[in-house]
Amino acid sequence: MGKIIALANQKGGVGKTTTAINLAASLAVQEKKVLLVDADPQANASSGLGIDIRQVGVSIYECMIDGANPADGIQKTAIEYLDILPSHIDLVGAELEMINIENREKILSAVLQPLKSSYDYILIDCSPSLGLITVNCLTAADSVLIPVQCEYFALEGISKLLNTIKIIKSRLNTELEIEGFLLTMYDQRLRSARQVADEVRRHFQGLVFKTVIQRNVTLSVAPSHGQPVMLYDADSRGAIDHIQLALEIIRKNK
């Protein structure tokens, strides 16, 4: 039975989608069957894996709003063992369309539960907000991975996210756990980055991943080629960091 991990942080620009793409690819390289669910209307995870979103017939939007079969929307990627359920800009309006639907917080859960037996890991790239779509993602997930940018304002907003997780855990998904906090965009030359990293570790202790995603040019260039970093440059720092993260998650979930 697969594990559903949501990658969430309502603060944009923290490396969430970059982590989603490259963690999914790194787990697949370890021969784990992975489905990446792009639940962000910007659809960057989809285009970052080479999907032409203009050609997408069935996306996560059709699955959630029209009751489409997710099997019709799932696409293969350039990496064996890695599939993607792409997003669409229409997802922006989905929250309004869902208002009158019964059990609206559990729509995504109903879409993903039948897929759990086909995959080792299902990763959800959440949108950078705490709206109804993100609530759906957290209700569907077994755990949540929180990327934290190693910059001054990084800790702002984490308390809001943790509060949302607490509410969802008490009302909608009692099984929801924190998979871990992931330090991203780390530049060891900067004292401020080291201070933020120390503060996150002091605050969240054992919940912080040992792996740190260092700031790396290749990580920001690879998506423009529609490739995860290990296909674009397997020897880059970004590729090595994400492989280490994948191995850490596999060890943790044995």
Image (cartoon, rainbow, N blue to C red):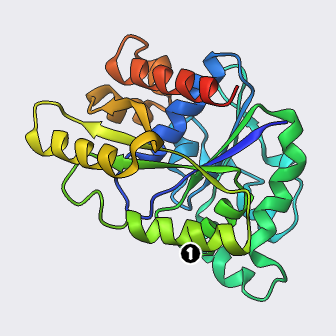
Dividing the image into 4 quarters, which one contains the C terminus?
top right
User: For the point 46% across and 26% down, which residue is it?
Assistant: 242
162 above or below 143? Answer: below
User: For the point 81% across and 52% down, which residue is it?
Assistant: 112
Provide the residue designation for mark 1. Answer: 131
Query: Which quadrant of the view contains residue 58?
Result: bottom right
Residue type for callout 1: Gly
**Residue 129 seen anywhere in this rendered image of the structure:** no
Residue situated in front as seen by the camera: 22 or 116 = 116
Query: Which quadrant of the view contains residue 111?
Result: bottom right
Horizontal side, residue 97 vs residue 63: left or right: left
Residue 186 lies, in percent from the top left, at 25, 36
> Crowding near pointer 1: few (<14 within 10 Å), some, many (20+)?
few
130 above or below 31? Answer: below
Task: Spot the residue most to the bottom.
Answer: 100
Helix, strand or loop under label 1: loop
Residue situated in front as seen by the camera: 10 or 72 = 10
Residue situated in front as seen by the camera: 232 or 216 = 216
Residue situated in front as seen by the camera: 115 or 141 = 141
Dividing the image into 4 quarters, which one contains the N terminus?
top right
**Residue 88 seen anywhere in this rendered image of the structure:** yes
User: For the point 56% across and 58% down, which residue is it?
Assistant: 40
Residue 245 lies, in percent from the top left, at 49, 27
Residue 49 lies, in percent from the top left, at 56, 35
Horizontal side, residue 156 vs residue 162: left or right: left
Task: Spot the residue most to the top.
Answer: 235
User: For the point 44% across and 24% down, which residue is it?
Assistant: 229
Q: How many marks?
A: 1
Residue 169 lies, in percent from the top left, at 66, 66
